[in-house]
Image (cartoon, helix red, strand yellow):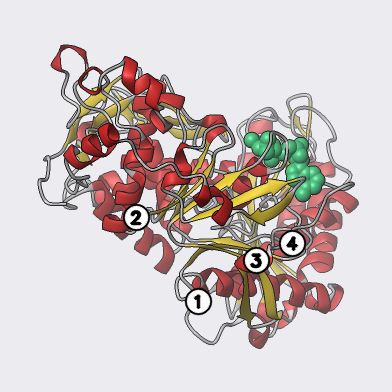
């Protein structure tokens, strides 16, 4: 402990590079400090530090966070709780920026409204490890050793004691955090046995503060109340019996006037695969793990995707069984997004008219009369959606306020009326006109929907090295991933919620390229193995050195990133078996 103090005194006033000498491990009373990486100058990314507190000091009994089965959900929730506690304490206690560049800052990465698996806080039976970053203080470009001493010896021990010792935290708050997460997990796992694709508890608060702020709307929010006909009761381990609206498997239509809360409901379902923190309003909202939002995304690249179930007979006979483009249209992009989601095992598609291509969704009778079937390459989703459910077990929830065409094929129709759901299934059915003879004829002639089974990216597309330079993988922001020479645009991948996931996706693609790209028969199969590996090890296996800034993505978002690599070569066989 004295050793670090001495070192800092010695290098005080020297050039910033002298900080490199302090890399290493130091024993403090009650914790071990590891200086894992020292920044090169005050303006570079801050230094990486990890702190290990033995569990006998921290005092979180294993009964608190251990689960009976092998599901680590309580441990993940405790890690989340502690990271937030540490962040809060840092904010309240640390002096913050002092000197040039990032001098004096201390931060830890945490999630927003969701509880994600991260590697900033790691709880085991033996210890708690917190990974933070610290801006080692500088005066201009000189070491400010005295200030650094203050950070390591005055500030650090205080924040550790306040945030990582059970005796200084509210046991009730911790219990609530862990129980809430465990309940959500249990709720999600019960959906299948109840033949539901999603559940929204009565009393849930769905609207958000704003389009760019995921916290709950503070004033004027109308809480959710299920219509009696769709009400379901579910037993949770901690909350006990809860009631709410169950969305059954099949095709569900969400209708209603503009600004009545349709998209807000769908957004809640998009986030339904994630657990939410207490107070979020969506703690008892869950959708199937494999729910994927699909939208139009014109301009995206598509590589070797069989979009022929939706789009065929393009001008000049272009092949749509192995369709590639650097600049997709609204309809071709939405078709590819669906096919790619199905390829990875999506069992629930979430679609909003606000972000869909109209010609992909519907084609009304008058348009069919004007543009004959053999001139229109698009088979709208409305013609395929029942087949997807009946033959392939894929359910869909669609927001559609502007067209009645989906009444014909919906199992359940929910009307959002002044933010409240009503079951209007019967009324919608009474409006079904029946398909015109011409249309039924066309439907009968549609070739069956076939799923691709063997598509995978070529090795060269996944190589992140840039000519003779080092491998470079980094997230610029939530929506932009740099992977070698590729810049991958994820701005339309709406279920990606955290920049830590974006970073992790980059590293996981690299791992996938090294371990599975060659041997796995398809992208879907390789990703399955990758996710298994991520779950039974931890996120550290993906990074060449110790970091605390990763969060676990879903496999659908990893696939989305791989699918958006431009100019990539893919192999696929067009499989004739459905
Ligand atoms: P739609 O998709 O039907 O046009 P939105 O879901 O976009 O409507 O909602 C319109 C507005 O109403 C948004 O600003 C949203 O935040 C707000 N809103 C949605 N649901 C609620 C609610 N339950 N209580 C209060 N405001 C809500
Ligand atoms: Mg809307």
- Residue 389 image label: 2
**Spatial distance from mark 3 to mark 4, Cα to Cα?**
33 Å
Callout 3 touching callout 4 (CB < 8 Å)? no
Instruction: Measure the C-alpha gap from mark 3 to mark 2.
Output: 39 Å
Describe the element under mark 4 as helix, strand or loop.
loop
Q: Residues within 10 Å of mark 4 (few under 14, many from 20)?
A: many
Q: Which mark lies nearer to you, 3 or 1?
A: 1
Cα distance between the residues tagged 1 and 4: 31 Å
Please identify, in this view, whether the residue under mark 1 or under mark 4 is nearer the observer. 4
Of label 3 and label 2, which has the lower sequence position?
3
Sequence-wise, which precedes: disc 3 or disc 1? 1
State the image quarter where residue 306 is shown.
top left
Q: Are marks 1 and 4 in contact (CB under 8 Å)?
A: no
Disc 3 from disc 1: Cα separation? 14 Å
Residue ID for mark 3: 79
Q: Nearer the viewer, residue 364 or 201?
A: 364
In this view, the residue in front, 548 or 300, is 300
Q: Position of residue 373 (x, y in %)?
A: 24, 23
Give the number of the disc on residue 225.
4
Residue 440 located left or right of residue 54: left
> Which residue lies at the image location 34% right of the left edge and 29% below the top edge?
565
Taking 180 as reference, is 472 left or right? left
Q: Which residue is mark 1?
A: 71
């Amino acid at each position: 402990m004295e050793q670090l103090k001495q070192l800092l005194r010695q290098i005080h006033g020297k050039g910033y590079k002298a900080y490199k000498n302090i890399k290493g491990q130091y024993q403090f009373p009650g914790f071990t400090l590891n200086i894992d990486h020292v920044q090169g100058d005050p303006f570079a990314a801050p230094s990486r530090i990890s702190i290990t507190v033995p569990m006998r000091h921290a005092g979180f009994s294993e009964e608190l966070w251990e689960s009976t089965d092998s599901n680590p959900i309580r441990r993940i929730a405790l890690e989340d709780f502690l990271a937030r506690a540490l962040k809060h304490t840092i904010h309240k206690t640390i002096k913050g920026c002092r000197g040039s560049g990032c001098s004096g800052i201390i931060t830890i990465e945490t999630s927003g409204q969701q509880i994600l698996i991260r590697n900033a806080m790691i709880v085991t039976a033996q210890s708690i490890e917190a990974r933070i970053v610290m801006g080692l203080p500088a005066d201009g470009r000189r070491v400010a050793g005295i200030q650094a001493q203050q950070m390591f010896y005055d500030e650090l021990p205080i924040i550790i004691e306040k945030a990582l010792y059970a005796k200084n935290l509210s046991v009730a708050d911790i219990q609530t955090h862990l129980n809430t997460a465990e309940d959500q997990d249990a709720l999600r796992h019960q959906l299948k046995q109840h033949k539901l694709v999603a559940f929204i508890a009565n009393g849930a608060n769905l609207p958000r503060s704003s389009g760019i702020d995921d916290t709950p709307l503070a004033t004027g929010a109308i809480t959710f109340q299920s219509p009696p006909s769709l009400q379901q009761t579910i037993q949770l381990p901690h909350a006990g019996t809860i009631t709410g609206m169950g969305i059954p498997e099949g095709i569900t239509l969400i209708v209603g006037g503009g600004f009545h809360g349709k998209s807000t409901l769908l957004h809640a379902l998009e986030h339904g695969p994630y657990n939410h923190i207490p107070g979020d309003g969506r703690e008892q909202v869950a959708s199937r793990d494999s729910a994927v939002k699909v939208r139009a995304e014109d301009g995206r690249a598509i590589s070797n995707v069989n979009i022929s179930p939706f789009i065929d007979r393009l001008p000049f006979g272009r092949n749509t069984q192995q369709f590639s483009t650097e600049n997709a249209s609204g309809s071709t992009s939405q078709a590819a997004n669906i096919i790619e989601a199905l390829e990875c095992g999506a069992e629930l598609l979430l679609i909003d008219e606000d972000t869909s291509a109209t010609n992909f969704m519907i084609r009304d009778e008058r348009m069919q009369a004007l543009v004959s079937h053999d001139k229109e390459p698009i088979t709208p989703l409305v013609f395929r959606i029942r087949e997807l459910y009946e033959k392939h077990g894929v359910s869909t929830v669609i927001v559609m306020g502007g067209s009645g065409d989906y009444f014909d094929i919906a199992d359940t129709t929910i009307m959002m009326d002044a933010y409240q759901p009503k079951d209007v299934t019967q009324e919608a059915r009474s409006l079904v006109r029946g398909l015109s003879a011409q249309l039924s004829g066309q439907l009968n002639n549609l070739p069956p929907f076939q799923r691709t089974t063997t598509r995978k990216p070529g090795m060269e597309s996944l190589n992140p090295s840039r000519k003779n330079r080092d491998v470079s993988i980094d997230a610029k922001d939530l929506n932009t991933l740099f992977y070698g020479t590729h810049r991958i645009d994820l701005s339309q991948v709406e279920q990606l919620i955290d920049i830590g996931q974006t970073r992790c996706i980059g590293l996981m693609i690299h791992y996938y390229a090294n371990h599975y790209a060659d041997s796995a028969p398809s992208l879907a199969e390789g990703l399955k193995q990758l996710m298994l590996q991520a779950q039974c090890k931890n996120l550290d296996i993906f990074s060449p050195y110790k970091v605390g800034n990763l969060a676990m993505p879903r496999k659908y978002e990893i696939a989305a990133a791989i699918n958006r690599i431009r100019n990539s070569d893919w192999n696929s066989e067009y499989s004739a078996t459905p």
